[in-house]
Amino acid sequence: MRPEILRALEKVGIKELNELQKTAYPKIKSKRNCLIVAPTGSGKTEAALIPIIEEIFEKKPKGIALLYITPLRALNRDMLRRIRGIAEQLNLTVAVRHGDTEKRDREKQSKDPPQILITTPETFQILFLGKNLRKSLKNVKYLVIDEVHELIDNKRGVQLSVAIERLRELTSFQIIAMSATIGDKKKIMRFFKCDELIELKTQKKYEISVIYPETKEEDYVLSEQLGVSLKFASVLRQIKEIIESHKSTLIFVNTRQTAEALALKLKKIANVEVHHGSLSKDVRIENERKLMEGEIKALICTSSLELGIDIGSVDCVIQFGSPREVGRLIQRIGRSGHKLEKVSKGFVIVDNFDDILESAVIVKRAKKGWIERPFIHENCVDALANQVTSLSIEYKRINLRKAFEIISRAYPYRNLKYEEFEELCRYFSEIKLIGLKDGMIYPLRRTRRYFYDNISMIIDEKHYIVKDIVNNRVIGILDESFLQTFEGNIFAMKGEVWRIVSIDDVVKVVPESYEAEIPTWVGEEIPVPI
């Protein structure tokens, strides 16, 4: 390894490569397409990036050489922090681009693309449609996809698989996929066309307990004080005791609604904040910082902090309610003791009989490493419509057979027949999503709007921005359906109570001190495997 790289690594605290990084280095340098599977905290990110950054440093390419795709915007920010620490010492340019990226930053990236671009699967789609950005994609030599378990068994993964094949039309590149929790490694390798598995055999140690809190004398007082049931008072007291006996705790819940309901009560007795995808970027970043710097003892979160994000030295994880899936439990508990040699410690706190049984089985399976096998969505028509419209915008005119060739190379569409594809494209043409004439696909007036309205494969609906007009600060978003069914003018968000002053394009609110209704957000409940 070059001395400049060694010096840059030493400055970010990497004095020598660990076992995983030493194994990965020669295989990645030899241009193998790799799947890296190793526990949380094992240095997977560095294992993938060190040999690639060295190559970029040596060759000094123009445009985007490395495209780093992560499924969450919070993970994007964390990757930017970690990669920038190494890259800037080597005079390499790095940037992040996703839904939260400011317009001026997007324009700068378009005019002067960075050598390393960190993005999400959805924003990756948009890169093909910008004149300058598409041109810079022709320089991509490395594609790294992080936390692939989060993408593989849903339509975001289907969409990404086609985008990867579209990138192959522009350039040849090496692909590195990574995850801590995978139930079927061979299927993932076929999905991403990897020819080398890099796996760390060292077992990560977990201490996981399932707790059904017993009622104590003090819970009667707490129940009355907080206006909650006796059982929920016992849960809150148990969580508070665990928080106070540890330095830094993450409290995972399965939905944003549960996060807000728990935060609303727990904030009254413990030093905690809340973090989920419907809170504003500023609020999320501020609460991440508070936990890292020790201003708060715990952070209540959804899957927004489930992945490999560096939020300081967390020494305990609480899962409130059944985690629903083995892989999800391992991923969440792995956030504590975020080093391979440390024990990951966690508690599953339940308040009903069904969750006791479900959690006990999930914990037992987790200790044996029995992770769910991914279910691949094949031949989905909605993702296909999304990609066909996007191809028509990208190419202006593209031959039907050429479009089929690109799409059918993607693993989820490998069994799609040309006749089926042709029939679907005729249907898309009939409903005016695309134009189709003489075997050529082309965009119509409606095409671009349809693509941008349906770019996300995540269930969605119209959102309203919520703004605290006292402090002139955006605090988050509400779904249209909640506002339509919401009768009062007081609701909870960010673990605090707000009164609605007006609803226009923006929901204007002021702080309030009453009890409040918890908002609902669409499409986020974790499915339970059979």
Image: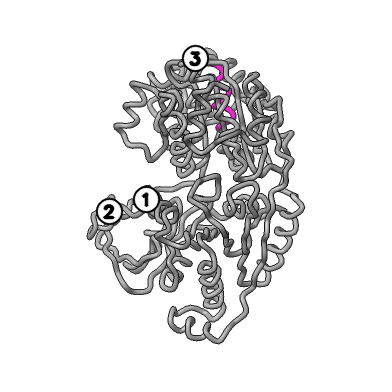
| Sequence-first disc among 1 and 2 | 1
Secondary structure that dominates the magenta span: helix
Q: Write down the residue under mark 2.
A: 473
| Relative to 452, 344 lies left or right | right
Residue 43 % position (x, y): 59, 39
Image quadrant of residue 101?
top left
Amino acid found under the numbered disc labelled 3:
Lys
Image quadrant of residue 142?
top right
Tag shown at residue 483: none
* Residue at 34% in and 55% down: 475
Q: Residues within 10 Å of mark 3 (few under 14, many from 20)?
A: few
Image quadrant of residue 432?
top left
Tag shown at residue 59: 3
Q: Which residues are magenta?
A: 160-169
Q: Is label 1 in a helix, a strand or a loop?
A: loop
Tag shown at residue 280: 1
Do callouts 1 and 2 mark residues in contact (Cβ within 8 Å)? Answer: yes
Q: Residues within 10 Å of mark 1 (few under 14, many from 20)?
A: many
| Sequence-first disc among 1 and 3 | 3
Is residue 162 within the magenta segment? yes
Do callouts 2 and 3 mark residues in contact (Cβ within 8 Å)? Answer: no
Q: Is label 3 in a helix, a strand or a loop?
A: helix
| Sequence-first disc among 2 and 3 | 3
Residue 463 % position (x, y): 38, 49
Residue 326 higher or lower than 126, as above or below: below
Amino acid found under the numbered disc labelled 2:
Arg
How far apart marks 2 and 3 lie (CA) works out to 45 Å
Residue 471 higher or lower than 457, as above or below: below
How far apart marks 1 and 3 lie (CA) works out to 39 Å
Quadrant location, the N terminus: top right
Q: Is label 2 in a helix, a strand or a loop?
A: strand
Residue furthest right in the image: 368
